[in-house]
Image (tube, helix red, strand yellow):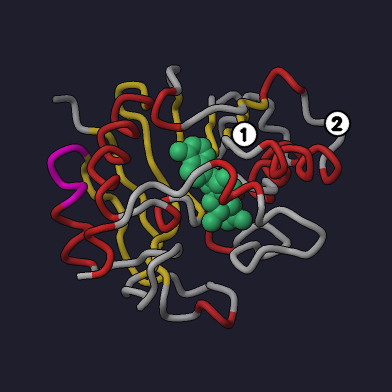
Amino acid sequence: MLEDNLSDFSVSYWDSHYGQSKPGWDMGSVSPPIREYIDQLQNKKLRILVPGAGRGWEVKYLFEQGFENTFLLDFSKNAIEQFRLLCPQFPDSNIINDDFFTHNSHYDLVLEQTFFSSLIPGRRINYVQKMHQLLKPDGKLCGLLFNHKFENTEPPFGDTVDIYERLFRNYFQFEHFEIAYNSIKPRAGREIFFLLKKIDL
Ligand SMILES: C[S@@+](CC[C@H](N)C(=O)[O-])C[C@H]1O[C@@H](n2cnc3c(N)ncnc32)[C@H](O)[C@@H]1O
């Protein structure tokens, strides 16, 4: 399979996508299923990470709703520069310009929005293990995954429900894992909304 021979996409690859125009994956606003999940969170003190946040629509929304312990992580300086323009009040101390795989901290919640699909399939198990490591006991990973493959040699990379279940089940308990009913039109029926709780290993 084509995907098996891929190597990681570099910072410069991602930087080059944050030019004048909006990158293809960028929805220009918070994703509705994630917005709905955020809206039912009661505890505004949660320590929340959004990795591979790009221009940071989810981060901006969380911040505007009063979740002040929200952290944006992206290794692309250009993405972060654009986020700063979109959300100038967001504290610099909560912006992490780093590689997800070397980041060390602990969070109550991590939100996933097209970051998983930006990674080559060979990195997925590292993603799952890193998410597990970054979460506090009983911490949760929530977000969206494409429910199908793409025939391409660059991101996005999707997969099937079966593959995802096998990937996460040794590290997370599945609280919710269903096709989202409130995706934006172009992604309708193609996104799984998931909520996974860290298993104590
Ligand atoms: C497809 S984009 C998604 C951006 C944003 N979540 C969205 O949906 O608009 C993937 C993002 O992940 C970032 N990224 C990819 N690999 C990364 C890594 N290892 N560490 C940190 N950021 C990474 C890229 O710079 C890019 O901004």
Query: Is 155 drawn above or below residue 44 in the view shown?
Result: below
In the image, residue 142 lies at what x, y percent? Answer: 42, 47
Q: What residue does disc 1 label?
A: 72
Write the residue at 23% across / 43% down: 125
Residue 36 visible in rendering: no
Write the residue at 62% across / 34% down: 72
Query: Is 166 drawn above or below residue 77 in the view shown?
Result: below
Q: Nearer the viewer, residue 94 or 119?
A: 119
Question: Label 2 is placed on what type of residue?
Answer: Gln
Membership of 170 in magenta stretch: yes
Magenta-drawn stretch, dominant element (helix, strand or loop): loop
Quadrant where the image shows the C terminus: top left
Residue 114 visible in rendering: yes
In the image, residue 129 lies at what x, y percent? Answer: 25, 33
Q: Is residue 136 left or right of residue 103?
A: left
What are the residue bounds of the magenta stretch?
A: 167-171
In the image, residue 179 lies at what x, y percent? Answer: 37, 72
How far apart are the alpha carbons under marks 2 and 1? 13 Å
Mark 2 vs 1: CB contact within 8 A: no
Q: Nearer the viewer, residue 95 or 110?
A: 95
Question: Label 1 is placed on what type of residue?
Answer: Leu
Q: Which mark is drawn over residue 89?
A: 2
